[in-house]
Image (cartoon, rainbow, N blue to C red):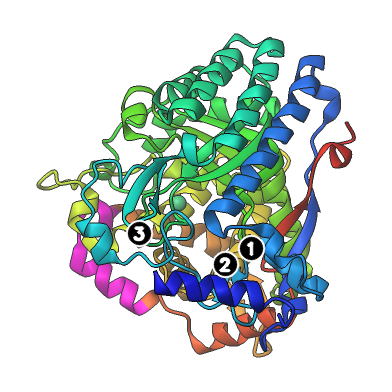
Amino acid sequence: MKKTLSFILLFSCGFAAFAQTDIDVKAKVAEYAYYDLKTDVSKLSDNDKKLIPIFIQIADIMDQLFWKQTYGDESDFKKIKDASVRDYIKINYGPWDRLDDNRPFVEGVGEKPDGCRYYPLDITAEEYAAYADPDKGSLYTVLRRNEKGELTTVWYRDEYKAELTKVCALLDQAIAIADDPGMKKYLSERKKAFQTDNYYDSDLAWMDMKNSHVDFVVGPIENYDDKLNEAKASYEAFVLVKDEERSAQLAKFIAMLPEIQKILPCDPQYKTFVPGTSSDLNVYDVIYYAGDCNAGSKTIAINLPNDDRVQAVKGTRRLQLRNSMDAKFEKIMLPIGKLVLDPKQQGYLSSDAFFWNVTFHEVAHGLGVKETVYGHRPVDDALQTEKTSWEEAKADIVGLFIVCHLIDQGEITGISIEEAITTYIAGLFRSVRFGAASSHGKANMMCFNTFKQMGAFKRSSDGVYTINYENARIAIGAWAGFILATQGDGDFQGAVDYRSRYGVIGPELQQDLDRINAAGIPRDIRFNQGLKTLGL
Ligand SMILES: [Zn+2]
């Protein structure tokens, strides 16, 4: 209990004197570029226009609940005089920098508690382990102390009762007016879930909702904010509007996957797996982010639900967030491309190409080999610690290979092969800008260095990159074939050797990345959002 008290005391009396640390918070705020979340409102029905304002009100409550979960009382910070510090607290939902390993940027707040406010601040891993309660690890409970200081378990429906009562009243309004039967059913089940902390039926109902033009992801969903046990779900909401045209195009391509699998550039034994064609992959404009998903770095794709029992029956829905992708392209990738690419090739940077590359990265995860050719072991088991890097490299390169193929076939229109390749290469700089320590980072570096090795691009002595499209096309095919064979053979040692050699950032590239970071190019995005931004 002692630690809790000193923490609270420090907060309550340290406030007037609150000053920022030596971190330049103003520069930190500028690293998040503003972007307006919009959609074509002329495509919204009258019913959609009635639902959206209600969804936004519910989303705002999710936002308040996430504040309570991750930090506590937001109003603690009202007295801080520096507007940039207040702004950065808002971006991070607390005084810890989410893009910098949760480093504190407000004097005196100390380290971010691993268990946020899902647990008492003074709980230890030992105390948690010794606490015998079957519900302690539930996604939907918090741990608190009773008057004797002993741990107790409280369900979200009780802990957040005041807010959730308002949510349910708003859901009643939405249920009454929703004219899509799938949406009506989903909202009704979701309301029950908020009241019972059982989300199973509402997840099923969400998967069954196939025809609604608007979508609403809402509730306690991801568990990454709980660094103590990764057990507690954080409240969040996305309000989404389906891009019917792009979704229909995508559905057509998904139906072509068994044919596409056959043309992959590898030996026949690596392409015997028959990909599913029933996956629920659609394109949306997001019009509102709230809570967990609005904190720090913003996602450009969603894959839900997380409950494997639901996944076993219904699969998952993958949502590609078109306007957020455009935002990352416009605010981050385009300026990076303009800094490092040959001016004659900069015109090939394209937000449409970025969209298709990212989307086919997702699609490519479902292609290729799932079992080793000899021994029929899952590829993941065979490649052990290398599995994620190689799977991500595969998704990138097989995805790019398919985009180029579909452009050749006249299926993807409006972009050229040059645009797909140029945009992909600029994207590598964006991805490894903050290092290559993660599996994704290593994958990106293997792609970068393999391309370089195969002459897909050349770097001038002053750090300007010129792409050779002919070589790039050859490199895509050869590298895709090599990855698929490594996975299909389950060649763990080969994977380690290749990754150790090519999965690293060389000194020249590091200079270029330093140049990008010094140029003040944003690291992420934040949103202007709401009815006014939408023009509703
Ligand atoms: Zn991936």
Q: Pointer 3: what residue?
A: 149
Q: Which residues are magenta?
A: 485-501
Q: Is residue 260 depicted above or below 422 in this figure?
A: above
Residue 191, given in percent of the width and then of the height, sits at 54, 23
Residue 59: image quadrant is top right
Q: Pointer 2: what residue?
A: 98
Q: Is residue 383 depicted above or below 58 in this figure?
A: below
Q: Residues within 10 Å of mark 1 (few under 14, many from 20)?
A: many
Residue 112, given in percent of the width and then of the height, sits at 50, 70
Residue 105, given in percent of the width and then of the height, sits at 63, 78
Q: Which mark is residue 92?
A: 1
Q: In the structure shown, which secondary structural element does the residue marked by tag 1 occupy?
A: helix
Check whether the beta carbons of the residues at disc 1 and disc 2 lie within 8 A of each other. Answer: yes
Task: Name the foreground residue: 313 vs 406.
Answer: 313
Q: Is residue 208 visible?
A: yes
Q: Is residue 529 left or right of residue 7?
A: right
